[in-house]
Every structure is written in structure tokens, then in C-alpha cells.
Image (cartoon, coloured by chain):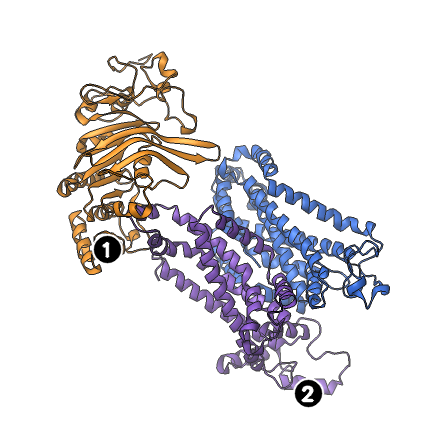
Chain colours: A orange, B purple, C blue
């Protein structure tokens, strides 16, 4: 039994003009203490996938399929039961530390409440434990910081607080939704370091959601690439980084700066991510694809497994080589 | 005020010059204007004395206020409590049950109450409770017994209750869609904890800034209540004084209302600063 | 009586200020299309038109004038003063035996006039004041806005009553008083938007072109405030009517033999205990229908002119 199993998950949003599919029939598993990255551009459905799992979709969102945690179905679970899992067994760190902490409450009460709720601690114990957690996320002067309000802290400090809150219940899974995007570059590196170290120390699995391949390379074991709500490729980091099979993964890699290979030319993927309300026919990526075949315009390629455990959703089976553009 | 044509002692019958002069001397109206003003201000500041009424020979402005003000205060405070507590609860419940039947009813009520100001509510209440049902007396005060209190309070509070409910509902909806509420949900907190621990304070802020204007409007509304229900509050005295050109009473009541308003706005500011940690004095 | 949902207006002001200038033509065309798609606003417009037609057409339909007393029914108003077609008192009579149909029509005219004139004064004063404060900024702005703050904390109804008492009860005084106490919100909104507009390129261009302050304010700033001013004015009209009704209810507003919705409701309210409910409910129906129409039209205009959703 896997720790976390997602099967045929779809997320639809009801709008005035109809329904928009944000996540389209995706499946994946996550094992114990594994670090998995979900990569994609904004609007690719990567955040909605995990929000759906925790029952955090916006009011007009509907999730179908199955999401199992330790064999227990999460979709359609009553809020009361779900509340025993989220924040306790599965914790989440959100993208924007500036707005994700309650500006009207002191850090102490925002930290204490999870411990008293899930661990049944007394307030004094919870406060001690919270200070210990702030030390663990290497926040200097934790005793002082814990009495402050969020607006009195910097972005990096707030994100550390968020991480401390998420890890304080010793969850089995930590979900981090773009945890570094809103931070300065220097702080980003520290933060990744922290994630890597802490999940190892606490033995938690980490689901890292990001659009930044640089972040993924340093810390994840496996990665999944999403495009327009669909899973287009998944495999280990090495496999995907050194021999991508899907043109989109290939394009992403060539648009990210490489430390190993600084001379490499950066080639952004042409065009824009498609609007979910108005997806292209067939494979949603075909208008931007350098390798498209005729059938890509008509039918969407299914995700199929190759022999070595990798999967990708593309009809093109040839080698992916950067094609020089006319005039170059 | 002195520029107004006519005075408190102009009447149909022309008074003899001498009599008029005597009367004016008694009230100090024969002195120069600046002297009158300083006497008036000194009286208020040193003795809390607003001077004699120009209309009633045996009553000072202080008597008029002492008689009417407790009445106004009693139904005013009740109306305020009812408007705020019911309005806030209604707004919260409507926001939590967003797009439910209850929500639609609440929104309908808040829109409808826009055209039901106190002077419309008052006669309608009398028709229902006095004329048709015969449950409540149509007016009077009788020492402020509850039967006499109900209709003034409902009439005065309804439209403000609706405004508060509308503000509360929309600000609660906004807060409930904010990122930090999503965080609270992800922490596994129950709905009750989310609403009362996390969402209530920020959602109350717009309501609190509306309390100042509400208070002023309610004071104003007391005029209608006093006239329609004959409750004998300060509003009636004000209108009578206005019609009778009883300047000292008008001034006294206006100053009193001004002081009340300023005090109340200060209380509101303090309350606001207490809730919002970003404001520190 | 009420506070206009100032947050929405402020938001709209921001949206409008940020809207691209070059598209202003399509903005108005688009707004008209959107307004006519809004059913509540459209129905309200029709209702309001009917009310206006009624108020001006009624004198041609009824033989009674608004001051004429029908002596034949005096003393038995409960029986003979009821609304009836036979007696030609279509809405019945009031307490003094005067025809309510004619009086409602006349009161409607007065109430509508008070609403429009009061809103008009408030808009003119508020727009100029706010535009000047916002345009010059700095110390002038802070002094002008402090004055607004102070004025706002005064229980204005008392001031209005004082004005009416001191300067005599006349309809002109009522207009002036209503206008003078209602421009405060308008000036704040206008000031805020002016501050945004004055930093736009076309204002710099006008300054570089040598225009003086007055020209810039009247030719460049105020036209760009038009949308917000229209919406705010449309919401001010019902507030003016409400305030006038309040004043008239106290007997301080419109003077006999003229009347208004508020005065009619006041008269009706006094006779409630004599079972002459039509005297209250007929003017009340006009009052409610009229106010609702104005609110929905104002709302419709706001939705139509707010560039947010496109």
C-alpha cells in the first residue's frame, strides 16, 4: 500500500459560462519519505491537484476520482474526519507567506492551535514545543519572534514560521505549494536547504509544487510534469533531466539556466500556456510543439508506461533535438 | 443664529418697548454678542450650565435635557444593541451559508430595508401590533416598560441592522476567501474555530468603521421616534425648540449631541486599533 | 438615512482610473449595452418613467386639484373618502377631504425635484471641491480634507433642521441644505480619483503645453471623472428623497398646500389609528417603488460603467 494514492483525479470549476476542467484524469502514487515534485506553468492544475486532495478547493470546484491516504479515501470524506488528517498527517505550506498567516493573530496562537488540536497538548506545552520548532527551522530569537504579529516579520521569517507550523505535528506528508516563489533568491536557497534537511529529519514525504526546475533538481527524487491539467510525463529526476521523452519537458529544460552547462543557450517555449476555457483540440500542447504529428491535432495522447517505470503522453517517439529556427 | 429674522420674544402682540428691554436684560440679550458668547461658554465649562430656556420660564436647558435624555438614551442603547448584534449575526450566518435560501432571504431583507427608514417603519409597526394584533400600546413611555420600548427599538434599528448585516456579510465572504483562511482550513481547524478565531476579527473591521455614522444617524432618528410614539425623549424637545426659536435649548441639545458623537467616534477608533494589530498609537 | 456602499464605489473609481484612456468611446457604448441587459435596472427605469408620467399626467385625469376640499364627504371620510372610481377620488381623500390622487401626483413632482436638485448641488460642490483638493495635493489637500472630516462627524440632520428654522422653511432652503450636507462623500471619492488621474501622461502633456490649472481641471480632469460622478449622483437621488421625506415627516419640509412623499406618509401615519390605511399605503407604495427604482438604476449604472469585468 502506498502512502498516498491518486487515481483518475479530475477537478472541474463551475463558471457562469459552463465548466472548466483544471485537472484532467491524473493518477500517481507517493511512497514513504519520498520527495516528489509536480512541475508545470501556472494554470497547469498542479496546485488544484493537492488542494482537491485536502478538500480546499474554491466553492465552485468539484473533484472526482479517488485520493487515498494510507488506504483511506479522502474525497467526499466528511469535514470532521478530514480535519483529523489535514494539518496533522498531511500538512501544507502555501505559496504566499505574506497573506497565508492570519494578520490579526500573534504567531504564538497560530502555532499553538495546531498542537492543542491535533496533539492534545496543554497551552504551555504547546508554546514550548512551538518555540522548539521555530529553533528547528533556524529562526533566530524564537522566544521573541513568537510573540509578534505577522506584519512585523520579513517574508523569509514568515515562510519559516509556516514551515514550523506545518512540521510541528510531525506529518507523514508535507505539501509545499511554490514555497520559494515569493522570496528573495538568497532566501530561496536557504529555504530549499531547510526543506531537504527537515523532511529527512522528520521522515516525512514531500510533495513540492513548483514551476522552477532549478528548485526541483536539488531536492526531489521523482518528478511529474503537468500541462493544461494533464500529466504529460513522470519519472525520476535523472531520467527526466537527462533524457526527457515529452517535448514539453524538453522545452522546459531548455528554458531553464543550467549550472552544469552555463554555455547552453536558453530557448523559451514559443507561445503561451492555453486558456483552460478554450483548450486546443487533441494534444493541448500541439500549437507550441516542435515535434507535432498530424494525429496530435485530433486525439490527445494517453499517458503510457514504458518498460522502466517511466511514463509519458506523446505520440512522437523519435529523438528530441533542438531544431534551429529559420534565420539562425 | 442671531442673523435670523425674528427672535424668541417676537410674537403677534407687540410688547411695549420697556417690557421687552426688561426681558432681554434678564436673559442677557442686551449685552454685546461677544459678551453673551463668553458668558455662555463660561457657564458650560465651569458649571455645566447651558443657561435658561427662552421658552419655558421655569425650566433651564439642563432641566429639559435631564428630562428627555435618559429616555432617548434608553431606547437608543437598546436599538444600537439590537442593530449591531442581530445585524452581525445575520451577516455571519448569511456568509457561511453563501448562496443558500437563508442567504437569499437575508440579502432580500437588506435590500428591502433600504426603503424602510424609521418614519416608514413606525406607522407600519403601529398598524400591525396595535391596530391588528392589539398587543402593544401605540405610543407613550410609561417609565420605559418593555411594552413601550419594543416598537421604538424596532423602528429605529431596522434599517441600520440591515446595513450592518450587508456590510458584515460581504466582508465575511471576502475574509473567508482569503489565503489565511485557507491556511486555517489546511490546519484541520473546525468551521467554528475558523469563523470565530480566525475570520471574525478581520471581518468586523468594516462594521466597526460603520458604527460611527450609525450612531449619528440613530440620534437623528430619535426625533422621529419621539414624535411618532410620544416617548418624550430629547428629539421632541429639539423639534419643539426649533419651532419655538428656543435658541438656548437648540444650542444645548446640539452641543450635547456633538460631544456624544465625538466621544463615540473616539471609542470606535480605540476599538478599531485594539482589533487591528497594524494600528498602534 | 443610509450610507451608499462606498467600498464598491471606491473600487469602481480605481478600476475606472486605471482603464485605458483611448478606449473611452467604446466604454460608453459598452456601458449602454450592459445597462440594457440588466433586467432589474431596465424594469426600474420603466417603473420610474411611469411614475414621472403619472405625476405630470394626473391633473388631466382627475377633476380635483391638490388643494380643493371636497365638502360633500367631510365628516364621513372613513366611508366616502375611500378610493373609488364613482366619487372620482381614485386614491381616496386625505384627512381634510382633499383628493389624494392629485396630492400624490403633486408630492411625487416635489420629491423627484428635491432628489434631482439636491443631488445636482451635491455633485457640483463635491466634484469641484474634490478635484481641487486632489489636483493641488499637499497642504491644500490636507487642510481641505480635514475640513471634510470635521463636517462629516457632525450630526447633519440637526444642522439641516437648524438651517430650516433659522432661515425659514422654504423649498429653496431645503435644496441648499440638502446639497450642502451631501457633497462630503462625493468630494472624497473625486479627490481619490483625481490623484490617480493627475499622474497620467495626458495631464503632463497638458501642463507641458502651457495649460493653466483651471483649464486642466475643467477640461481634462473632470471629464475623466464623469463615470463615477454619474453613478454616485444616481445613488444620491434616492438618498436626497429619503432625507427630504424625513424632514417633511417632522413637519419641517415642504409647506402646505404643497406636499411630498414624506409629508404624505406623515399625514397618513397620523391617521393610522382611524383605520384610513389608504392614506398611508398609497403614498408609501409610490415612495417604495420610486426608491427601489433609483437604487436599482444606480446599481445598474455602476455595474455597467465599472470596467472591472471586461
| Residue at the spot of label 1 | A116
| Residue, far left | A201
Of residue B212 and residue C88, the one placed in the foreground of this image is C88
Q: Residue at x 25, y 24 (%)?
A: A253
Q: Is residue C224 above or below residue A320?
A: below
Quadrant hosting residue B276: bottom left
Of residue A304 and residue C244, the one placed in the foreground of this image is A304
Viewed as shown, does residue C34 lie left or right of B98?
Answer: right
Q: Which chain is indicated by disc 2?
A: B
Of residue B86 and residue C157, the one placed in the foreground of this image is B86
Q: Residue at x 63, y 48 (%)?
A: C293
Label number found at residue A75? none
The N terminus of chain C, quarter of image = bottom right
Q: Residue at x 42, y 39 (%)?
A: A60
For label 2, count other residues whose C-alpha is less than 10 Å away and answer few (under 14), some (14-19) or many (20+).
few
Please name which of the two marks, 2 or 1, marks the residue nearer to the observer.
1
Residue B146: % across, % down: 53, 73
Look at the numbered disc 2 and give the secondary structure of its residue.
Answer: helix
Residue A63: % across, % down: 36, 35
Q: Which chain is indicated by disc 1?
A: A
Residue A205: % across, % down: 19, 38
Q: Is residue A62 visible?
A: yes
Residue C133: % across, % down: 52, 52
For label 1, count other residues whose C-alpha is less than 10 Å away and answer few (under 14), some (14-19) or many (20+).
some
Viewed as shown, does residue A46 lie left or right of C196?
Answer: left
| Residue at the spot of label 2 | B22
Q: Are marks 2 and 1 on the same chain?
A: no
Viewed as shown, does residue C206 lie left or right of A95?
Answer: right
Q: Is residue C214 visible?
A: no
Viewed as shown, does residue A78 lie left or right of B7?
Answer: left
Q: Is residue C4 above or below residue C220?
A: below
Amino acid at each position: 500500500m502506498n502512502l498516498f494514492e491518486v487515481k483518475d483525479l479530475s477537478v472541474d470549476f463551475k463558471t457562469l459560462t459552463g465548466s472548466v476542467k483544471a485537472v484532467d484524469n491524473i493518477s500517481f502514487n507517493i511512497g514513504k519519505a519520498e520527495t516528489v515534485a509536480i512541475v508545470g506553468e501556472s494554470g497547469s492544475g498542479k496546485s488544484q491537484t493537492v488542494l482537491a486532495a485536502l478538500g480546499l478547493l474554491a466553492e465552485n470546484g468539484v473533484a472526482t476520482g479517488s485520493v487515498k491516504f494510507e488506504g483511506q479515501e479522502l474525497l467526499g470524506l466528511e469535514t470532521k474526519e478530514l480535519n483529523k488528517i489535514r494539518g496533522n498527517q498531511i500538512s501544507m505550506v502555501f505559496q504566499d507567506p505574506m497573506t497565508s498567516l492570519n494578520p490579526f493573530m500573534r504567531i504564538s496562537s497560530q502555532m499553538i492551535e495546531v498542537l492543542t488540536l491535533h496533539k492534545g497538548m496543554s497551552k504551555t506545552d504547546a508554546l514550548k514545543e512551538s518555540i522548539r520548532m521555530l529553533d528547528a527551522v533556524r529562526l533566530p530569537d524564537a522566544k521573541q519572534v513568537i510573540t509578534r504579529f505577522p506584519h512585523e516579520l520579513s517574508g523569509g521569517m514568515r515562510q519559516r514560521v509556516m514551515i514550523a507550523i506545518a512540521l510541528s505535528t510531525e506529518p507523514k506528508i508535507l505539501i509545499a505549494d511554490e514555497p520559494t516563489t515569493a522570496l528573495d533568491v538568497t532566501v530561496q536557497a536557504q529555504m530549499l536547504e531547510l526543506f531537504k534537511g527537515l523532511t529527512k529529519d522528520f521522515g516525512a514525504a514531500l510533495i513540492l509544487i513548483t514551476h522552477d526546475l532549478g528548485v526541483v533538481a536539488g531536492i526531489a527524487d521523482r518528478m511529474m510534469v503537468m500541462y493544461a491539467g494533464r500529466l504529460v510525463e513522470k519519472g525520476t529526476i535523472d531520467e527526466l533531466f537527462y533524457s526527457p521523452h515529452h517535448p514539453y519537458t524538453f522545452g522546459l529544460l531548455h528554458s531553464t539556466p543550467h549550472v552544469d552547462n552555463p554555455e547552453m543557450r536558453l530557448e523559451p517555449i514559443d507561445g503561451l500556456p492555453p486558456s483552460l476555457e478554450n483548450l486546443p483540440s487533441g494534444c493541448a500542447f500541439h500549437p507550441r510543439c516542435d515535434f507535432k504529428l498530424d494525429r496530435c491535432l485530433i486525439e490527445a495522447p494517453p499517458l503510457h508506461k514504458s518498460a522502466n517505470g517511466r511514463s509519458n503522453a506523446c505520440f512522437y517517439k523519435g529523438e528530441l533535438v533542438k531544431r534551429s529556427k529559420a534565420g539562425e | 443664529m442671531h442673523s435670523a429674522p425674528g427672535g424668541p420674544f417676537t410674537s403677534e402682540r407687540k410688547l411695549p418697548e420697556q417690557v421687552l428691554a426688561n426681558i432681554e436684560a434678564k436673559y442677557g440679550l442686551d449685552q454685546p454678542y461677544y459678551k453673551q458668547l463668553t458668558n455662555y461658554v463660561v457657564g458650560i465649562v465651569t458649571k455645566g450650565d447651558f443657561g435658561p430656556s427662552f421658552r419655558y420660564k421655569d425650566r433651564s436647558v439642563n432641566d429639559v435635557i435631564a428630562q428627555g435624555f435618559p429616555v432617548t438614551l434608553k431606547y437608543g442603547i437598546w436599538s444600537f444593541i439590537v442593530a449591531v448584534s442581530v445585524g452581525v449575526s445575520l451577516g455571519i450566518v448569511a456568509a457561511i451559508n453563501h448562496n443558500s435560501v437563508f442567504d437569499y432571504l437575508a440579502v432580500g431583507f437588506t435590500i428591502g430595508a433600504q426603503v424602510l427608514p424609521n418614519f416608514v417603519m413606525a406607522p407600519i409597526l403601529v398598524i400591525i401590533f396595535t391596530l391588528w394584533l392589539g398587543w402593544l400600546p401605540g405610543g407613550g413611555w410609561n417609565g420605559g416598560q418593555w411594552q413601550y420600548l419594543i416598537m421604538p427599538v424596532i423602528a429605529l434599528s431596522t434599517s441600520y441592522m440591515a446595513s450592518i448585516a450587508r456590510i458584515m456579510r460581504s466582508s465575511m465572504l471576502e475574509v473567508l476567501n482569503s489565503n489565511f483562511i485557507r491556511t486555517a482550513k489546511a490546519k484541520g481547524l473546525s468551521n467554528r474555530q475558523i469563523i470565530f478565531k480566525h475570520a471574525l476579527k478581520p471581518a468586523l473591521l468594516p462594521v466597526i468603521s460603520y458604527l460611527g455614522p450609525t450612531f449619528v444617524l440613530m440620534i437623528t432618528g430619535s426625533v422621529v421616534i419621539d414624535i411618532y410614539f410620544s416617548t418624550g425623549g430629547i428629539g421632541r424637545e429639539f423639534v419643539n425648540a426649533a419651532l419655538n426659536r428656543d435658541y438656548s435649548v437648540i444650542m444645548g441639545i446640539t452641543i450635547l449631541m456633538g460631544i456624544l458623537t465625538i466621544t463615540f467616534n473616539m471609542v470606535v477608533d480605540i476599538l478599531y486599533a485594539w482589533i487591528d494589530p497594524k494600528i498602534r498609537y | 438615512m443610509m450610507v451608499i456602499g462606498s467600498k464598491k464605489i471606491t473600487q469602481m473609481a480605481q478600476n475606472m482610473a486605471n482603464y485605458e484612456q483611448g478606449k473611452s468611446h467604446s466604454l460608453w457604448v459598452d456601458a449602454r449595452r450592459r445597462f440594457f441587459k440588466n433586467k432589474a435596472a431596465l424594469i426600474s427605469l420603466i417603473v420610474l418613467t411611469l411614475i414621472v408620467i403619472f405625476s405630470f399626467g394626473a391633473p388631466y385625469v382627475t377633476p380635483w386639484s391638490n388643494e380643493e376640499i371636497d365638502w360633500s364627504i367631510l365628516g364621513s371620510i372613513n366611508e366616502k373618502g375611500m378610493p373609488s372610481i364613482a366619487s372620482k377620488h381614485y386614491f381616496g381623500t386625505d384627512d381634510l377631504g382633499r383628493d389624494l390622487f392629485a396630492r400624490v401626483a403633486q408630492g411625487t413632482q416635489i420629491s423627484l425635484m428635491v432628489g434631482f436638485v439636491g443631488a445636482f448641488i451635491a455633485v457640483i460642490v463635491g466634484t469641484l471641491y474634490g478635484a481641487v483638493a486632489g489636483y493641488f495635493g499637499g497642504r491644500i489637500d490636507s487642510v481641505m480634507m480635514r475640513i471634510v472630516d470635521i463636517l462629516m462627524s457632525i450630526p447633519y440632520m440637526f444642522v439641516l433642521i437648524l438651517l430650516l428654522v433659522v432661515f425659514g422653511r422654504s423649498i429653496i432652503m431645503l435644496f441648499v441644505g440638502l446639497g450642502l450636507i451631501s457633497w462630503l462623500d462625493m468630494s472624497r471619492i473625486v479627490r481619490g480619483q483625481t490623484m490617480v488621474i493627475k499622474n497620467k501622461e495626458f495631464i503632463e502633456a497638458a501642463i507641458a503645453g502651457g495649460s493653466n490649472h483651471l483649464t486642466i481641471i475643467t477640461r481634462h480632469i473632470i471629464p475623466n471623472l464623469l463615470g463615477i460622478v454619474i453613478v454616485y449622483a444616481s445613488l444620491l437621488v434616492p438618498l436626497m428623497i429619503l432625507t427630504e421625506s424625513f424632514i417633511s415627516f417632522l413637519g419641517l419640509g415642504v409647506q402646505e398646500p404643497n406636499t411630498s412623499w414624506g409629508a404624505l406618509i406623515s399625514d397618513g401615519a397620523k391617521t393610522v389609528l382611524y383605520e384610513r390605511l389608504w392614506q398611508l399605503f398609497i403614498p408609501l407604495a409610490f415612495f417604495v417603488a420610486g426608491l427601489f427604482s433609483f437604487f436599482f438604476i444606480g446599481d445598474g449604472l455602476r455595474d455597467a460603467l465599472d470596467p472591472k469585468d471586461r
